[in-house]
Image (tube, rainbow, N blue to C red):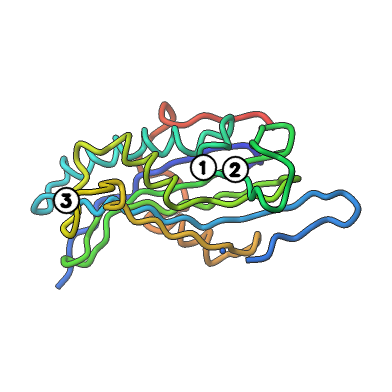
């Protein structure tokens, strides 16, 4: 993928079976950060119903397209305020390039099969930044709350029903790139989602 692009793919339905150091280019203040982000809706597809999976996955695509829009890095990313004077993230200013590659799938384990996504977020930036998991949970919940299962322990803070895991990965991590493309025979797209994502200029 070229820098500044956004891609979201839906993996085929799977039948059930029984954060790092940011490198700095010396003298420039430019950093490159690579985040591997997993977001689970905790929604289990109804009795292996593929249409239910596809319907929910399409809505999840819309939510993730909005969240990872490279024109609005402030949605997915946050400033580490205690380490910088910056108070916001601006594309073309302190966020130079922003690329995301996402796949949506369901787990294959009958006990833990939930619709979820894996994203590789790659950013070139000049300020200290992070991904706040609670912020991501709230934003995703606001988009798809009508089908998110309620929390069992408490009705307060319902957005916490969504699970988010974030970690830093090396830029050339072939294992991560292969993982993002799993379920796609040639690493390409199973389903044409051209209308669901856009290519952003750097």
Closer to the camera in the image, 32 or 148: 148
Residue placed furthest toward the top: 195
- Judge from the rendering whether residue 143 lies leftward or rightward of residue 173; answer left or right: left
- Judge from the rendering whether residue 95 lies leftward or rightward of residue 175; answer left or right: right
Q: Residue 57 — which label?
A: none
- Judge from the rendering whether residue 55 lies leftward or rightward of residue 11; answer left or right: left
**Mark 1 and mark 2: Cα distance apart in space:** 12 Å
Secondary structure beneath dot 2 equals strand
Say which label, 3 or 2, has the lower sequence index: 3
Q: Nearer the viewer, mark 1 or mark 2?
A: 1
Q: Which residue is mark 1?
A: 76
* x then y, percent, for residue 178: 50, 61
Q: What's the residue at 12%, 47% (across, down)?
A: 49
Closer to the camera in the image, 132 or 42: 132
Labels in figure, total: 3
Q: Residue 99 — which label?
A: 2
Local crowd size for mark 2, using a 10 Å CA cut-off: few (<14), some (14–19), many (≥20): many
Secondary structure beneath dot 3 equals loop
User: Where, by quadrant of the figure, is residue 195 drawn?
Assistant: top left
Q: Quadrant of the N terminus?
A: top right
Secondary structure beneath dot 1 equals helix
Q: What's the residue at 58%, 37% (across, down)?
A: 73
Q: Quadrant of the C terminus?
A: top right
- Judge from the rendering whether residue 183 lies leftward or rightward of residue 133; answer left or right: left
Local crowd size for mark 1, using a 10 Å CA cut-off: few (<14), some (14–19), many (≥20): many
Closer to the camera in the image, 186 or 57: 57
Q: Which residue is mark 3?
A: 45
Say which label, 1 or 2, has the lower sequence index: 1
């Amino acid at each position: 993928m070229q820098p500044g692009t956004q891609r979201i793919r839906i993996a085929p339905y799977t039948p059930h079976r029984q954060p790092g150091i940011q490198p700095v280019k010396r003298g420039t203040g430019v950093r490159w950060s690579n985040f591997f982000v997993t977001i689970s809706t905790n929604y289990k597809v109804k009795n292996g119903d593929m249409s239910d999976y596809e319907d929910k996955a399409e809505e999840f695509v819309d939510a993730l397209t909005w969240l990872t829009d490279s024109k609005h890095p402030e949605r997915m990313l946050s400033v580490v305020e205690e380490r910088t004077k910056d108070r916001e993230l601006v594309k073309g200013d302190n966020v130079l390039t922003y690329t995301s590659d996402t796949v949506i799938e369901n787990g294959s384990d009958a006990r833990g099969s939930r619709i979820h996504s894996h994203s590789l977020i790659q950013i070139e930036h000049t300020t200290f930044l992070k991904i706040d998991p609670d912020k991501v949970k709230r934003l995703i919940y606001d988009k798809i709350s009508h089908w998110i299962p309620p929390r069992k322990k408490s009705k307060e803070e319902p957005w916490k029903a969504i699970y988010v895991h974030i970690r830093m990965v090396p830029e050339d991590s072939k294992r991560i790139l292969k993982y993002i493309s799993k379920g796609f025979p040639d690493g390409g797209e199973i389903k044409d989602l051209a209308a669901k994502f856009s290519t952003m200029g750097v």
